[in-house]
Image (spheres, grey):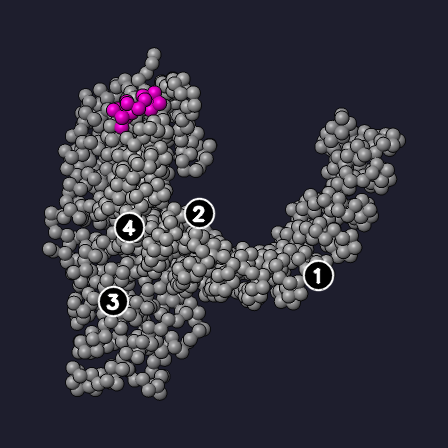
Amino acid sequence: MSENPFEVLKEDMENEEVYLKVNAMHRVKVVATLLGSDKIKSQLIPYFETLLKKEDDEVLFALAEELGNIAQIIPNQSSCLLSLLEQLAGFDETVVREQAVKSIAIVCGFLGDNDIANTIVPMIIRLASNDTNFTCRVSAVCLMCPLYARAGNQKEKIRQKFTELCSEETPMVRRAVATKIGEIAQFMDKIHVIQDLIPVLKQLCQDEQDQVRLLCMESLMNIAKILNSSENKTNILPLIIQSAEDKSWRVRLALSKIFADLAEAVGKEIADSSLIQIFSNLLKDTECDVRVIAVRSLARFIKFVSPEKLNLIVPLLQLLSKDPFSQVKQYACEVIGQIATLLPKEYSQSKLQQYLIDLMADDNQDVRRNAAKSAGQFAAAIGPEALNQFVPFLKKCMDDPKWRVRKETMQTIIQLALTVKNPDVFNKQLESVFVMFLKDRAAEVRSMGLIQLPALIATYKQDWAIGNFLSKCIETLSKDVGSLYRINALYAIQQISFAVDGPIAQDKLWPIVQKCLKDPVPNIRFVSIKVAKSLQKKIDNQQTLNQIKQSINELLEDPDRDVKFYAQEALQN
Amino acid sequence: MNNKPTSSKQAPAARQQPQPAATSNQQRPAQPIIQNMARVTDPKHVPKEIRDQFLKKIHFCSQPYDFNDDTKNVKEKQERSQYLQELFDLLKEPNFVVNLVVPHLDLIIEMIEKNIFRPLPILKKTATNGEIGMEDDDQLIDPAWTHLQPVYEYFLQLIVNEQPDVKSLKIFITHSFIQEFLELFDSEEPREREYLKNILHRLYAKLVPRRKMIRKAINDCFYTLIHETYKFNGAAELLDILASIISGFAVPLREEHVIFFKTVIIPLHKVQTCQFYHEQLLRCSMLFLSKDPTLATFLVEGLLRYWPFANSAKEVMFLNELLEVLEVCEISKLEPLIPKLFKRLIKCIAGPHLQVADRAMCFFENDYFLTILKSYKPFTFPLLVPVIAQIADTHWHKVLQESLNALKTILKEIDYQAFDKALNNKDPKYLYIIQDAKNQKKDRQKIEEKWKNLTKQAIQKNPNFKEPIVPYSDTHIVGEHNGLNNGNITIL
């Protein structure tokens, strides 16, 4: 009964379909576990050798992955897998060699430092010196990063080879180096970073291919992280300045993307003294895509500079908020909202408020939406006294033809109401805007108001809920404005009922619902049943409870099927 | 070495008309150089003021302007076009070229570099409201093109011109020049690519000492396309140039060229944007095969290896190429590929796409292919006959059913006995291709059972053993490795 595992593997690998072979390959660890290390060496590995020549890339990709798994089965003898992996690391197909590199790293995890120095480093050097296949050299670059730290006295050799590869003629290798130079720096002693890596980084930042320069940006940031302020000033800052003036917009865009992280990496001092100036130019870039990315980074960037330097950014924001490209304005809105939390109140009020108000009336709906959102942040930062200046415009936004804008505005109003927590301000300013959700055309907006209602009732108490707000609900219910609005108002009443005492529910709410149970529209009738049901839970008075039951009972004979269903359901429990 | 490109490309479309503004600008002191030059009696000694004037104009044309905004620097741009026209006119007179242009080639090349070596713009597409899969007919137009075109035209004429000799030109055509030049091929502007192609073509023809370097740079370009970016707008143009380079290769091919065929030409087939340059690629492939027919089997192998998945248009392209390549193959060399080849054809014929099936059926109208089929009768008949016989009865499309029946007759005619024998074969190897998924599952049962047992044993041996997860299952045709979860597709 017992099968020979190796034979089963071979049998399944005979299959015609590639996907079945891939499956079989992924079961190799079953075979490896059963065979044990000796047979892995004597049978399995020679068999894999034969596969390298004839199999499809998909199968080899699976093989590269499984070799990593086999290494875990025979951790002490996993170096026997290296020869196969080395071959796979030089393969043409990108995914195969990347997977091989990953598996080599796994194998190295099981090796002692001696083995790394004596086996792995020579392998890396071998790959790095392969002149015919650039793929080998790319794999070598990828391997250097994780293994440099463990290379012992061979570090020098790796450094030398790495810097050598930076001056490669083959662009693919230079691109690999540009991507990895920031990573390998993390493992190096600082002195070597400055002596060996910075010169090649400089060279790569001036590469004739914009692709290479572009990939340097991320590495630039990673290296900046490990240097101190003065080292950054002499080594990294010139490269940032140079890249910000790069003739290729792709490079400038890549730089804009990481600018906030870069500011964090180089520290406040350099950010204050130099980066603001450089970044200002990127924000004014001629290419609109660069501006879009730059202004997106700006929101985070302002956190990494000193507050007193922020006034340098304000004129730029004024400029950006008038940008011809609407995406720029859209993100500028966000920054205005955020920067207001950092700037002195009067300053933001005098310099930015009007710009934000103008943006709330922009032609583009995304801009208006973001502006409405930022208006909340802005007003909250300034304090209640700024509210009366924004409310008229927020009210206008609630009349916006686009529901997304209205939804965002509603959200803003609710957020504001929840942050100020001041009944006076709320009653005077915000409530009138908030209740607009009852009459909104879009279900999204209506349900937004409904969802947030409990939080508002919790903040402004039942006096408000059964006072002003209830009267608005009644107004909606009594006016013939279409059943959807009335249903919404009914649900609002249900929300009120959760928050109020029994007597109030009985005196104030039940009469309204009672009337609605007789509404000509069936949907209103069954929603009323649901609301009546939640009233039941609040009310103690037996007489009223009987009244409720009675009213629902009457609906058992309703001509509408759904109403009947809900009435039955309500009476059952 | 006979490396001369043979095909001569026609010069690009007519140049821009001279600007009418040029004539109304007479009050300007700067008179056209050509008139001044015409007055010079001894062309060997060009007076200083003319030379200065010439240099000033070159310098002027090297200035960058924002060509995307027509309202900016209108006057300067107009002046620039006029100067470029003048510089262009100078090339018509060999005398002027020798005495004025060639001595200042450095500045001229610099002027050209400053103009054309720019980061390629992102051309914004107007709202893409077309259906998916519809080709966008709107050409993307670079607004700077009208200002770049005269520079390209000038460059082209400069290279075409007999006067600047190889020695003086060679200095400027460095590796980094070529690399930057090749990057421009990614331009979205087809007219720009056409110029680039023509210029590079001439450069290659003219600068014999730079040929190897240019070929290497083109190789790198293709490597990037194959291994990293998967998209390059100028691939077709570069292949066009290659086609003429290849036809200049001496026979027998050098090792270097064979490697190029194997590491660039064949893998180019697998790139997902292959359809944009397949026509040119096919031409290059066939040129290679005409130089060395033994390469054909490698190409057949490559095609079978990189066969497209879920892309029927590309499959049709591959089928066309495959048939063409097979005709070059020496039949005796094909033996190791026969099972894969015929399996692929059966899959195409039995597949769900009618055009693919139809294309695959065309193979059987080709005499050379039929010879291959006959030569490997012991292999091909057992593969083909059972499948063909079955789908000839069951195929859903009438026309294809007819041609399948015709094929059945052909096969019978070739060898009636072999046909009968294959038909009665108890265990036809490829019949599973046309089976439904359920039956296939049944066939797999035995070996799946074995795996299950082995897994159990492995768990016994090592309690921590985790059962392997296989990427492909009945419900995952694309495999989980691709990050797609196509739970509703079954393998057929």
Q: Residue at x 50, y 64 (%)?
A: A273
List x then y, in percent, for residue A258: 46, 55
Q: Residues at marks 4 and 3, common chain?
A: no
Q: Which mark is residue B132?
A: 2
Q: Are marks 2 and 4 on the same chain?
A: no
Residue identifier under label 3: B156
Q: CA distance from mark 4 to mark 3?
A: 43 Å
Q: Residue at x 39, y 60 (%)?
A: A235
Answer few, some or many: residues within 10 Å of disc 2's Cα (few below 14, many 20 plus, some between 14 and 19).
Answer: few
Amino acid on which disc 2 is placed: Ile
- What residue does disc 1 label? A386
Eyeballing the image, is A348 above or below B447? Answer: below
What type is the residue that disc 1 sits on?
A: Ala
Q: Chain of mark 4?
A: A
Q: From which residue to which does the magenta span run?
A: A31-45
Q: Is A41 a magenta residue?
A: yes
Secondary element at tag 4? helix
What secondary structure do most residues of the magenta stretch adopt? helix
Rate crowding at label 4 as few (under 14), some (14 to 19) or many (20 or more) other CA atoms within 10 Å.
few
Q: Looking at the picture, do discs 1 and 4 lie on one chain?
A: yes
Q: CA distance from mark 1 to mark 4?
A: 62 Å
Kindly identify which residue carries mark 4: A160
- In the picture, measured across the screen, residue B132 lies left or right of residue B278, that is right
Horizontal side of A281 relative to A33 (left or right) equals right
Q: Residue A134 placed where, x, y %?
A: 26, 47
Of badges 4 and 3, nearer the viewer stands 4
Q: Which one is in front in this view, the residue at disc 3 or the one at disc 2?
A: 3
Q: What is the secondary structure assignment of the residue under circle 3?
A: helix
Q: Chain of mark 2?
A: B
- Nearer the observer, A236 or B15: A236
Q: Residues within 10 Å of mark 3 (few under 14, many from 20)?
A: many
- Please tell me which residue is depicted at 23% across the width and 62% down the height of the picture: B174
